[in-house]
Image: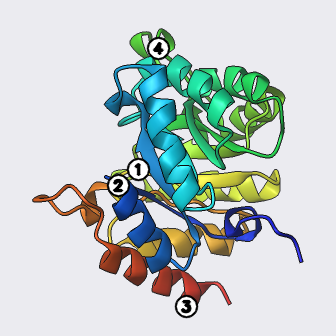
């Protein structure tokens, strides 16, 4: 039996935000450890502050840390790469153009790195111009298969399809899911996912045959008063995962 955390073995692993170390621990237990906890680099003034604080999350959750950008902010790309090199987390969120830098600085192939691509409104095409400079230019719409190959070239692990706006881009998502399955690549649906549409979105990816799925469920399960992710909602999501993944 491997002693790796569940994240590396699970076909489906949840990704939720953690507002504090205690909130991370509560959500980690609510999902019976089948989750990575997003902590956003944008919330820190310096690399040193981020590294010091994120190490506390790692210590309490068996390194179930997902280093985040902050609402997909491309200007956080370099900071994410720098702090991840020190932290060696299980999971990293990156814009498309930042994947190669993150992989090189990590110095290993195990950590999961996603590459953010966006819906285009055209079936089979995604926008890869999601970096600090490229996101300010005309969109670069490329076939999803090409985007996957480019991410593999850079050492990426998965497509982060964002912003999905729930089911607004469901037809595009189905094509992306099939491409990930056909090309042995993982998939991270993100944006507007909630307790109501989560099952349908996850089922699409499972039916397509995607080998590893990391759905991001963020604002819809955050308590607006405390900014904590609600552990009881994480538990509900995990129960749906258990139901669908036999």
Residue shown at 54% from the left, 43% from the top: 55
Say the numbered circle drawn on residue 243. Answer: 3
Query: Which secondary structure, mark 3?
Result: helix
In this picture, residue 24 sits left or right of residue 149: left
Percent across and percent down for residue 38 are 45, 49
Q: State the CA–CA distance, disc 4 to disc 1.
A: 20 Å
Q: State the CA–CA distance, disc 2 to disc 1.
A: 7 Å
**Quick check: 240 above or below 154?**
below
- Where is the C terminus found, in terms of image quarters? bottom right
In this picture, residue 44 sits left or right of residue 181: left
Question: Residue under circle 2?
Answer: 168
Query: Which secondary structure, mark 2?
Result: loop
* Earlier-in-chain disc, 4 versus 3: 4
Query: Which secondary structure, mark 1?
Result: loop
Query: Residue 33 falls in which quadrant of the image?
Result: bottom right
- Where is the N terminus found, in terms of image quarters? bottom right
Percent across and percent down for residue 79 are 51, 21
* Earlier-in-chain disc, 3 versus 2: 2
Q: Nearer the viewer, mark 2 or mark 1?
A: 1
Question: Residue under circle 1?
Answer: 164
Query: Residue 222 falls in which quadrant of the image?
Result: bottom left
Say the numbered circle drawn on residue 132. Answer: 4
Q: State the CA–CA distance, disc 4 to disc 2.
A: 26 Å
**Quick check: 227 above or below 99?**
below
Q: State the CA–CA distance, disc 3 to disc 1.
A: 23 Å
Residue 203 in view: yes
Residue shown at 41% from the left, 81% from the top: 235
Residue with the most extreme right position: 1
């Amino acid at each position: 039996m491997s002693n790796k955390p569940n994240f590396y073995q699970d076909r489906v692993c949840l990704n939720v935000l953690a507002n504090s170390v205690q909130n991370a621990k509560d959500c980690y237990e609510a999902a019976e450890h089948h989750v990575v906890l997003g902590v956003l680099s944008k919330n820190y003034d310096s690399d040193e502050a981020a590294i010091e604080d994120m190490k506390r999350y790692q210590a309490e959750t068996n390194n179930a840390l997902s280093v985040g950008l902050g609402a997909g902010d491309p200007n956080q790309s370099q900071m994410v790469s720098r702090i991840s090199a020190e932290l060696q987390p299980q999971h990293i969120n990156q814009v498309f153009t930042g994947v190669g830098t993150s992989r090189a600085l990590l110095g290993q192939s195990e950590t999961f790195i996603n590459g953010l691509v966006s819906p285009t409104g055209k079936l089979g095409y995604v926008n890869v111009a999601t970096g600090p400079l490229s996101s300010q230019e005309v969109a670069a719409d490329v076939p999803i298969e090409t985007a996957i190959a480019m991410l593999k070239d850079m050492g990426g692990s998965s497509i982060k399809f964002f912003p999905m706006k729930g089911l607004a881009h469901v037809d595009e998502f189905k094509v992306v899911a099939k491409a990930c399955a056909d090309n042995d690549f993982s998939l991270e649906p993100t944006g507007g996912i909630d307790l109501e549409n989560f099952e349908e979105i996850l089922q699409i990816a499972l039916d397509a045959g995607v080998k590893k799925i990391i759905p991001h469920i963020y604002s819809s399960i955050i308590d607006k008063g405390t900014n904590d992710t609600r552990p009881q909602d994480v538990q509900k999501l995990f129960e749906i995962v258990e139901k669908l993944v036999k």
